Amino acid sequence: MKKRAIYIFAACVALVLSACSKDDAALDYAAGEGGIVMRLAETRAVDISGLTLDDCTVFIYQNGMAVDPSQPEAEPEETATLIRKYTPGKCPETIRLLAGAYTVKVQWGEQPEAAAFEKCFYEGIADFEIKSGITETVTVLCKPQSVIVEVAFDSSIAATLADYSAVFELADSDAADKSLTFKSSDSGYFTVPDAGGRIVWAFRAQHAEKGEILKKGEIAAEVGKRYGLTFRYSPDLPGYISVDIEVDETTDDNNDVFIFSQDPEVNGEIFTAPQDFTAESVPEEMIVMLKAVGDAVVQSAVIYLSENGAAAESSVGTRAAAENETVVWRWPEDMADTSKVQWELSDDEKELKVSLSSKAILPSDAEGGVDAGRTDLRFELVDSYNAKADKTATIRIEGLSPVGVDDYDLWTNDLTLRAVSAKGAPIFRMRADGGEWYTLNAAMTATNEYMAILTDDDKWTASENAVAGTIVYRPKQGLYANHHYEFEVEIAGRKYSRTLDTSCNQPIPYGDMADASLSCFTTDNANAPYWGSGNNSFAKELCTYATKSELPCAHLKSTMAGMLGITMLAAGNLFTGTFVRPSTTGTVSFGLDYDWKARPTAMHVKYHAKIGTVNQQKHKKNGSHPANIGDQDKAIVYVAIVDWSNRHGVSSGTGAPSGVWSPDEAASQAEGPIIGYGIFRIDTSTEGDDLVDFDIPIYYYDKTAKPSKQYKLVISSATNIYGDYMCGCDSNELYLTDFRWVY
């Protein structure tokens, strides 16, 4: 830790013009002469290779009275005539002066023109009187003539923000170097007029989600004061950045001291190297000595803990930030709690001995033993001069670390397993729901620490879809919702195991079709919140509420609708979206906002179908007839996971349709990308009269992106696959219910 100046209140240096240790008679003053001997007064721990009088500039002024010759009747004015100036290193031990009144001025340091990090200027003035044959003693307080700005960035800043800095600038100044940029905690110095001045500041940073963060402020700065600003990140406060300002003032009644402190010490065998143990070999206690040095004493101590992988450095992990640590013990606040730590403070309060209970401090497993994995214990000591020291000990317990919420993702289907092994590379395995074990590749991230992750090759199988020839992906392994997983690691023939249940409640809204009042069962679908249909005044039964196999269902039925003397096929339909029919043309707008919590592998549906051959072909004359009379008709149910800023519209009626789309034809529409899709084309009638269960596999164009725009889900079904073209069988029927995700 770098040595630094610690300011208690404002910094002052006490200089004393004091009696010499010699007998005054031995100085052999001439008649009418006296003297002063200058030295630095004793200060607490002033040690920067020995601060002495040689570092100061000393001025001696002789005081008197004078009358302005141009105004002989005016009152005499006090005068101060410079008679001596001693530059650093030139001031003699004994200064002889004639009896009379004098003023001494002492200066130390360097005055910045406007702003600087390393320059601070101190000055003190005192009057004294020399009497014949006597050595006088005079005390001079040197006060800072600069404004001291001390900036501290709380640990929450580095942990949450990037590219952060605080710029302080002396306002109303034409100086070239009038600003200081702080990118870490430090002190800076500004020169302001004696009457004070303004220092303006701006804090800027980048947040991964919120973008640039900017906070501004101003200090009404006064000479000789220290302004301490602490910046913290707080997502609960407007502007996200909170600033604490502390002002220390110099007064003649509080002679503050300029102290250079030595760092305290943290020592113990556990710091020599990472400590490798098995669960059975962990020592009962671990001893650490916390020691203040110089004339400081122990003021406070904190023990922080961070678990498993916090210090792993690899392509998939970096060291955890301080805010992810947990405080496990504080002194003196927790000194009464001896369940975790036994402590002993030396009589001179310079040493604090702590004996840690391993089983109480280190993370424990379900049976009360010490958990496997890596644990970092950080010990922080603060002494009475506010100097800090910290040291981190690494404890590694052989075995498989627990799998926490940060180790897996149910959308990207990622998984990270960690283990500690001092006996060579471990073998990682996993399985779901009691199935076959699957082996994962392991990589060493640090000495005796290993990690295994699911790669793309583990998670996905690539194929080419038949319609567009586009590469799509189906899940292979991965970690999915609503499964019971077992993990194990084998180390030198010994196996350690963990389990994880990935329960996730993510229903499809009203997927059970149990609510008979849904918009899709009415002709009011212009503002359908969930399910809509093409029901209208000319075709009211394209989607109706019904039961099948004693379950509520949506009953979709093809209909011949008449309008303006024209009869045409209207396909029974059900979809997530809205429907309007302002004229002879109706428009379906597909899309539903949806909070995706986990990636599904399929969509389940119960269905019953009656499918015939094509007997209607409305748009034959204009060539828009994708099927011929007598061809096998099909019903369709499809799902699309989309990331759309607007709903996608499809219009059809007496003219050729527009906006017709199928999610397997392209990976995007004008409204945005299609993340994945599943299509079930039904070309045969179901046997009997019961509902049939079917899982529609979902294929993914994108393996990582999660929908974030307004519309994220499309589900659509129709009794005629070419219903938009009024082409198909006019007697097709489809019962649908139990829409839900499969993982």
Image (cartoon, grey):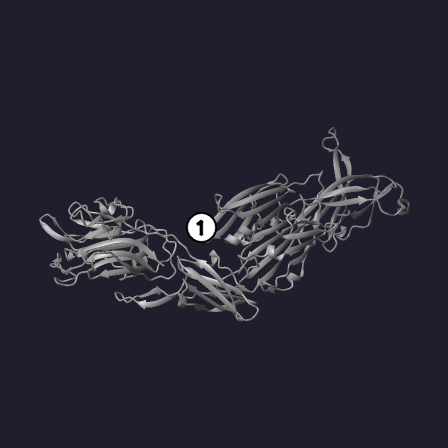
State how many labels appear: 1
Residue 255 image offset from top left, x and y in percent: 72, 42
Q: Is residue 688 left or right of residue 742?
A: left
Q: Is residue 506 left or right of residue 273?
A: left
Residue 476 image offset from top left, x and y in percent: 37, 66
Q: Is residue 392 left or right of residue 546?
A: right
Point 60% across, 54% down: residue: 360
Q: Which residue is mark 1?
A: 210
- Position of the C terminus, as image quadrant, is bottom left
* Outermost residue toward the left in this view: 565
Q: Nearer the viewer, residue 405 or 200?
A: 405
Q: Nearer the viewer, residue 353 or 260?
A: 353
Q: Residues within 10 Å of mark 1 (few under 14, many from 20)?
A: few
- Position of the N terminus, as image quadrant, is bottom right
Q: Nearer the viewer, residue 606 or 424?
A: 606
From this view, report whether residue 138 is shown above or below residue 591. Answer: above
From this view, report whether residue 656 is shown above or below residue 14. Answer: below
Residue 69 image offset from top left, x and y in percent: 74, 33
Point 56% across, 61% down: residue: 374
Q: Nearer the viewer, residue 210 or 497?
A: 497
- Circle 1 sits in a helix, a strand or a loop, which is it? loop
Q: Residue 227 is drawn in which quadrant?
A: top right
* Outermost residue toward the top in this view: 73
Which residue type does callout 1 highlight? Lys
Q: Is residue 338 left or right of residue 520?
A: right
Residue 486 image offset from top left, x and y in percent: 45, 62
